Image (spheres, grey):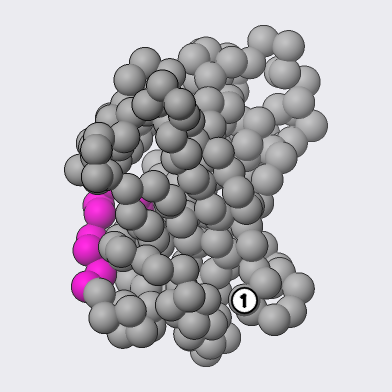
Amino acid sequence: MRLYIIRHAEPAYPEDALTARGHRQARALARRLAREGIDHLYSSPLGRAVETARPAAEALGLAVEIEPWTREIEDWWIPGGPEGELPAWQVDGAAIRALVPGLSPENWHRLPPFDLPVLRQGFAGLRTASAAFLARHGCMAEARHYRLKPGAGGRLAVFCHAGFGLTWLAHLLEIPAPLVWAGFALPPASVTTVDFATLPDGRAAPRCLGLADVAHLGRPAPALQGL
């Protein structure tokens, strides 16, 4: 099974829509995905993600299926600091790296400044929703790995958001979320590819084949923006 985590194209945030360039990026994404053999298209319910998915849906002849759990994690805010509140995934990278000796996939939300109920509960909810979503496609979570049912698989494109996409990737790869937030970025209209390759004993372990790819846009990655 192969999963494509796609950040929405360049947004016009006040309208929760796309800019003119964003619509061009969405069409470029559609041309790329038409070559990938996509079986299902999923989207966050937010307008900027749905608008990004529509050209691909038209090109592939597929419906855009809405997955509410993939919306941006807009309530994951860290209080304090000179900037006031900021999204958890935008905490200063140097501050996160200082936590490295004590970080693990299980305990990162117990360490300041991430030791907030909203992060702990939100991440638990993401894990549960991810497991249910993958199980619908025959990819069953088992402890720290997955197992594909006979005949399971397919290629799934999920149109979502920067903060959500990075956090989901952290969960899938068993990496502490703050390290992914500090070390990686998802520019608009980027594609991150995760493959669930079956091992000889029937287990499957997610592997990232490509991160934040924007080659289909035909120019350097656009400037990073907010949510």
Does residue 167 appear to the left or right of 124 in the view shown? right
Q: Is residue 65 above or below residue 137?
A: below
Counting from the top left corner in percent of width and height, residue 125 is at 30, 31
Q: Is residue 114 above or below residue 60?
A: above
Q: Is residue 19 above or below residue 192?
A: below
Viewer-nearest residue: 133 or 179 = 133
The part of the chain drawn in magenta is: 63-71
| Residue linked to disc 1 | 216
Viewer-nearest residue: 198 or 106 = 198
Give the farthest residue toward the front: 200
Q: Is residue 47 above or below residue 165?
A: below
Q: Amino acid at mark 1?
A: His
| Residue in the image at 45% along x and 26% along y | 200
Q: Is the residue marked by circle 1 packed among few (<14), some (14-19), or many (20+) residues within 10 Å?
A: some
Counting from the top left corner in percent of width and height, residue 94 is at 79, 32
Question: Is residue 64 on the magenta stretch?
Answer: yes
| Residue in the image at 55% along x and 69% along y | 189
Counting from the top left corner in percent of width and height, residue 167 is at 49, 39
Label 1 sits on a secondary structure element that is: helix
| Residue in the image at 25% along x and 70% along y | 64
Counting from the top left corner in percent of width and height, residue 6 is at 48, 61
Does residue 179 appear to the left or right of 196 in the view shown? right
Task: Determine if residue 21 is in view.
Answer: yes
